[in-house]
Amino acid sequence: MDRVSSETEVRDHSALPRTRRDEFIVFFIIAALIWPVVAVGVVGGYGFLVWMLQLVLGPPGPPN
């Protein structure tokens, strides 16, 4: 019986409403930190892929 009440308390505690300040902080972290890192990773990964393909298949252009 005690275990059920403690699980309910934990569930109720995690369902606290977010404040506007909390949402702004999360937005700032996503917009200013996470997305720039993801963007650099995607562009860098694409550049690396093109570089490796050119090493294997040769440079682009008409064949000689």
Image (tube, rainbow, N blue to C red):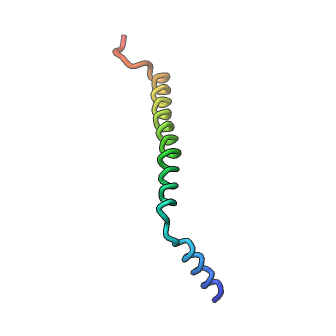
Q: Residue furthest right?
A: 2
Q: Give the residue drawn at x 54%, y 77%.
A: 12
Question: Of 13 and 48, which appears nearest the observer?
Answer: 13
Q: Residue furthest bottom?
A: 1
Q: Position of residue 16 (x, y in %)?
A: 52, 71
Above/below status of 42 relative to 63: below
Question: Of 48 and 28, which appears nearest the observer?
Answer: 28
Q: Give the residue drawn at x 48%, y 24%.
A: 56
Question: Of 51 and 20, which appears nearest the observer?
Answer: 20
Number of marks: 0
- Report whether 17 appears left or right of 3: left
Q: Residue furthest top?
A: 64
Q: Position of residue 46 (x, y in %)?
A: 45, 33
Above/below status of 38 relative to 62: below
The quadrant of the rendering that contains the N terminus is bottom right
Q: Residue furthest front?
A: 21
Question: Of 30 and 5, which appears nearest the observer?
Answer: 30
Q: Position of residue 6 (x, y in %)?
A: 63, 81
Q: Position of residue 13 (x, y in %)?
A: 57, 74
Q: Give the residue drawn at x 36%, y 10%.
A: 64
Q: Quadrant of residue 60?
A: top left
- Report whether 5 appears left or right of 22: right
Q: Give the residue drawn at x 48%, y 56%.
A: 24
